């Protein structure tokens, strides 16, 4: 039986950073792309051998109690105690229990979204996933508004909300959380010790102001399981990015997956400059050796899946 070929080479790809955007020309073009249902189902089955999005999307209340000690995934020697607030916000059942959607959008944060006009198309999908509390209101024409799940790495609190140093920043975060209006807020709380206080601040705000969000905290095994799946398919990632985590989870509950805002390159397909994020002035950090991500490598794998019809990547304008 034919294997899914995600990365043709058996060794980690050496990334030539010159002219990367040319190498990554996306084919087939949008209008010609066709969904390959058989392949999508095969990928879902393969991924299910490593993880189950229904379970791994969040630790559940029944499995932890206040005071329990957790070792951080990336800092095994550091621990945290499950606080009363965290315990209260753990879901009782999986927010994805028995969920199935015809089409899902995963919206990455690349500046390639600017002037894409993709907002309307993104909002037509049955389930829309966004990353790291990226703003939508001011960019609605290009990124849409619908949000069913949004992730929040604790570092976002520092980067986008000044570590809540004063009432103004606390209020900004609070407004953003209120605007989520019942969607799932996915917080990787057990990854690195640096996020400890930030997660606690957010949990406290949510409870104190009765913010209407459904919190979820990914399981302790998720990251390794996702990495394991990709490594088995010869995609030698260091640490999966949020975008790749979301795609891997989405294969479980989405029939068709559409990716927008995935473009980790400083030039677009027509050689025009592209911002790293559509909404801030962050620079291309992934090029540094110290960065935990291997985004161009991930992109290559996603592009190959696009070519085979397992997912659809949009990196230009929407029709
Ligand atoms: N992304 C991309 N190209 C960019 C920026 C982002 O493909 N230029 C995708 C990545 O998959 C990324 C996702 O969009 O995971 C969300 O972007 P970001 O918020 O920057 O996510 P991370 O890099 O995973 O977050 P962090 O820096 O906190 O680890």
Image (cartoon, helix red, strand yellow):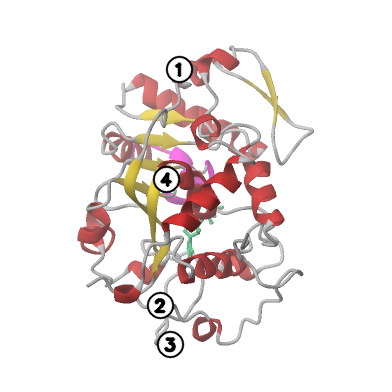
Instruction: Classify 300 as above or below 310.
Output: below
Q: Which tag, 4 or 3, sits closer to the chain's start?
A: 4
Question: Which label's residue is closer to the chain start, 3 or 1?
Answer: 1
- Badge 4, how many Cα within 10 Å: few under 14, some, many 20+? some
Q: Tell which of 86 and 48 is nearer to you.
A: 48
Of labels 4 and 3, the one closer to you: 3
**On residue 92, which mark appears?**
1
Q: Earlier in the sequence, mark 3 or mark 2?
A: 2
Q: Residue at x 49, y 68 (%)?
A: 308
Cβ atoms at labels 1 and 2 below 8 Å apart: no
Q: Nearer the viewer, mark 4 or mark 1?
A: 1
Asked if residue 149 is positioned above or below residue 123 in the image, the reply reads: above
Measuring from the top left, give residue 304's x and y in whole percent. Answer: 53, 69
CA separation, marks 4 and 1? 29 Å
The residue lying furthest to the front in this view is: 1
For mark 4, give the secondary structure: helix
How packed mark 3 is, by other alpha carbons closer than 10 Å (few <14, some 14-19, many 20 or more), is: few
- Residue range in magenta is 154-168
Report whether residue 108 is seen.
no
Question: Mark 2 near ligand 1 (CB under 8 Å)?
Answer: no
From the image, which quarter does the N terminus lie in? Answer: bottom right
Residue 311 visible within the image: yes
Q: Quadrant of residue 237?
A: bottom right
- Residue 210 percent across, percent down from the top left: 31, 21
**How many discs appear?**
4
């Amino acid at each position: 039986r034919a294997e899914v070929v995600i990365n043709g080479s058996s060794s980690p790809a050496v990334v030539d950073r010159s002219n990367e955007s040319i190498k990554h020309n996306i084919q087939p073009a949008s209008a010609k792309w066709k969904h390959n249902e058989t392949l999508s189902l095969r990928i879902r089955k393969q991924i299910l051998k490593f993880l189950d999005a229904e379970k791994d999307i969040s630790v559940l209340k029944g499995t932890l109690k206040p005071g329990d000690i957790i070792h951080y995934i990336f800092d095994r020697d550091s621990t945290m105690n499950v606080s009363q607030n965290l315990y209260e916000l753990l879901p009782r059942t999986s927010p994805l229990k028995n969920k199935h959607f015809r089409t899902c959008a995963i919206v990455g944060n690349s500046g390639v979204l600017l002037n894409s006009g993709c907002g309307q198309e993104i909002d037509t999908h049955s389930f829309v996933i966004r990353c790291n509390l990226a703003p939508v209101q001011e960019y609605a024409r290009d990124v849409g508004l619908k949000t069913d799940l949004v992730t929040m790495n604790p570092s976002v609190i520092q980067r986008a909300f000044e570590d809540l140093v004063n009432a103004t920043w606390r209020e900004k975060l609070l407004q953003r959380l209120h605007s989520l209006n019942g969607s799932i807020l996915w917080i990787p709380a057990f990854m690195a010790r640096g996020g400890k206080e930030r997660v606690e601040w957010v949990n406290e705000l949510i409870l104190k102001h009765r913010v209407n969000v459904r919190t979820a905290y990914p399981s302790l095994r998720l990251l390794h399981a996702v990495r394991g799946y990709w490594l088995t398919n010869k995609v030698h990632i260091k640490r999966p990015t949020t975008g790749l985590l979301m795609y891997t989870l989405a294969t479980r509950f989405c029939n068709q997956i559409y990716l927008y805002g995935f473009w980790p390159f400083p030039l677009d397909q027509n050689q025009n400059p592209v911002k790293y994020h559509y909404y801030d002035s962050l620079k291309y950090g992934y090029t540094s050796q110290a960065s935990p991500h291997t985004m161009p490598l991930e992109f290559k794998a996603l592009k190959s899946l696009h070519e085979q019809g397992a997912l659809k990547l949009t990196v230009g304008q929407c029709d």
